[in-house]
Amino acid sequence: MFDVKLTVKSVKGFCSAGYKVGDYFHIKGGLMIEAGKPQGICMYALPALIPYLTAYCRETSASDWINLKKELQCPDNTNAVIFGLERIKSK
């Protein structure tokens, strides 16, 4: 299993959750969400990200499609927040 750090890479328009470039949060071992900066996690973005994050946290073969993902977007196309993905080996 991997931990995953999601970092805000860009915000197009106005993010109603208040995300700014550089904000982040973690998924620990595919089980727990750990708030970073800010302390809150957007309730609209989270359900859109979860299906990808559950796959991204797992050990996968090199040819698995999830390994190609480097970014995810919140579901608001008008005011899109782009999250960068970083895998971190779980302890």
Image: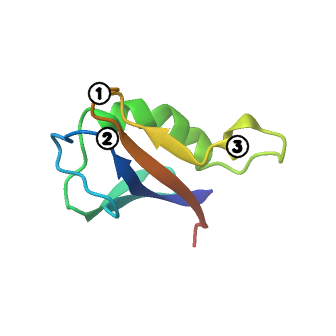
| Residue at horizontal 36 percent and vertical 35 percent from the top | 74
Task: Single out the mark in the foreground, 2 or 3.
Answer: 2
Judging by the rendered image, the residue that carries numbered circle 2 is: 12
**Local crowd at mark 2 within 10 Å, few (<14), some, or many (≥20)?**
few
**Local crowd at mark 1 within 10 Å, few (<14), some, or many (≥20)?**
few
Residue extending furthest bottom?
Answer: 91
Three-letter code for the amino acid on which mark 2 is drawn: Lys
Mark seen at residue 78: 1
The N terminus - image quarter: bottom right
Query: Which of the pair 76/51 is nearer the observer?
Result: 76
Q: Are marks 1 and 2 in contact (CB under 8 Å)?
A: yes
C-alpha gap between disc 1 and disc 2: 7 Å
| Residue at horizontal 58 percent and vertical 50 percent from the top | 57
Quadrant of the rendered image containing residue 50: top left
Judging by the rendered image, the residue that carries numbered circle 3 is: 68
Q: Secondary structure at mark 3?
A: helix
Tell me where residue 34 appears, x and y as whole percent: 33, 60
C-alpha gap between disc 3 and disc 1: 25 Å
Tell me where residue 14 appears, x and y as whole percent: 19, 40
Three-letter code for the amino acid on which mark 1 is drawn: Thr
Tell me where residue 25 appears, x and y as whole percent: 35, 59
Tell me where residue 6 appears, x and y as whole percent: 44, 55
Q: Is residue 16 above or below residue 41?
A: above
Display colour scheme: rainbow
| Residue at horizontal 60 percent and vertical 40 percent from the top | 55
Q: Is residue 6 above or below residue 60?
A: below
Task: Single out the mark in the foreground, 3 or 1.
Answer: 1
| Residue at horizontal 43 percent and vertical 49 percent from the top | 83
Q: Are marks 3 and 1 in contact (CB under 8 Å)?
A: no
